[in-house]
Image (tube, rainbow, N blue to C red):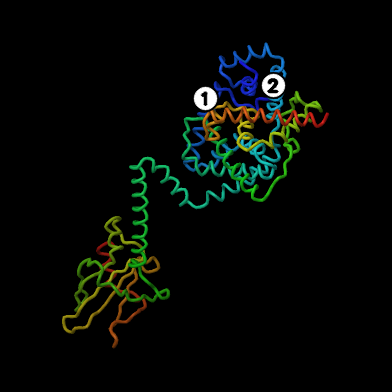
Amino acid sequence: MNCNRAKDTLPLYAGGDLSPIEAGKISAHLQQCAECRKFYEGLANQQTLLRSLRQTTVTTAALASMRQGLFSRLAAERLGSWVRLERFLLIEARRPRLAFAAAAIVVIVSATFFAQLWQVTANPAVAVFEDRDTLRLPADYREWIVLGTASTGPHVGNIYVSPAAYHEYERRGKFPEGTVMVLESKAASDNGIALQASVKDRRFNEGWGYFRFDATAEGLAKRTRVLPESAGCLACHRDRGI
Amino acid sequence: MELLMTRVPDSETAPETLEIETLVRKTLAGDCRAFEQIVLQYERRVMTLSRRLLRGIDEAQDATQEVFLRAFKYLHRLDVRRPVEPWLMRITVNVCRDFQRKSQRRHYTFCEAPSKESETPGNAPDPYSGFAWEQERQKLWKALNDLPEKERMAVILRDVEGFSTAEVAEILGSSESTVRSQICRGRLRLKEAMDRKTGEQS
């Protein structure tokens, strides 16, 4: 091995980066050549010096200050659950079947949520009072479920209840608070409609309040006050245990 | 105390990797505390390397934050069966390269030796604490910073940080033979610079 080739590989030899065979050749050359030996010693010293730089590290104070900033930036990063959902979907996207399942769950959950929201805003299942005792006429009662028929005196007619209240009754065996039942009856003698309503409300006697919407020149009254007591209605409710 | 700065021997990495694996999984499941544990475990390593690759402590601080934010963002891409450290070091190198590009655009040429705001870990006596050694070290540090960028990075990672040539290649995203020649040229250039400085002084 000549000196030029040795000098090209001596930096690697000084750092222990040569294979044993290559290193053996260099060692043999160094034993013969004083000039290369001097060059190598300089490199070896430099390696020690470079290694000694490893000892210095950043101060604990600098680390603490860095960490403080980092943790607040991380907290800002974590804001928003949608980001995390997106991340979750991204991870699961490695497994397409799971990603599909996750996406399907998101769609179902949000569809159910919006459907419920729509139901609540579109079909109020509960009675609307204007003040403590004045009930507003339920405008769409004819779209409700017909519970059965009832006859009071000369009148006979259908009893309507809102679908939401009916479903609740099916499920739990009792009507929810605020349920409105409407009895729309026609007298056999004339064509006039009589409308009676009962509202399930704890404020009233035995839990139900009774109302009558009288016919006026413009049709039925839009609002009416609670009746003092209606023996007939009370008896009917009591008989059916509702 | 040297241990604080050198890498953990291979025989000891197994339980550490296992623990990191749990921490990574917990983080991905949304546990914020788990990621903070990862930060605490690697912050000194990351910030020290940033400090060596960049010019000032403030830049190193910003870079370290950026490294962990990127790590947090791309944690799902990490293969937990492999050691985390080279992955973090690779992010650190990339972040520092970005920072260098930015500061070059601002004609940022100031350079200082790291010892001004650094400390020797623990209370172990520094075997090279003699005045002459300290002077040599400062001189070397300056010469190191004057190296061409690629050679500087390779030498810092191999000789100062103590990674193997294969690890340096992985961190820099380059081949082992390229890294070997960069290290070789870097060391040689460093020696020439040091010899020149010694010649100027005498």
Residue B14 - label: 1
Q: Hey, which quadrant is residue A175 in on the image?
A: bottom left
Residue A36 vs residue A83: left or right?
right
Identified by mark 1, the residue type is Ala
Foreground residue among B194 and A164: B194
Q: Hey, which quadrant is residue A12 in on the image?
A: top right
Residue B43 vs residue A194: left or right?
right
Identified by mark 2, the residue type is Ala
Residue B21 vs residue B108: left or right?
left
Chain containing mark 2 = A
Q: Quadrant of the N terminus of chain A?
A: top right
Secondary structure under the numbered disc 2 in the rendered image = helix
Q: Hey, which quadrant is residue A129 in on the image?
A: bottom left
Foreground residue among B10 and A191: B10
Q: Residue at x 47, y 50 (%)?
A: A83
Disc 2: which residue: A44
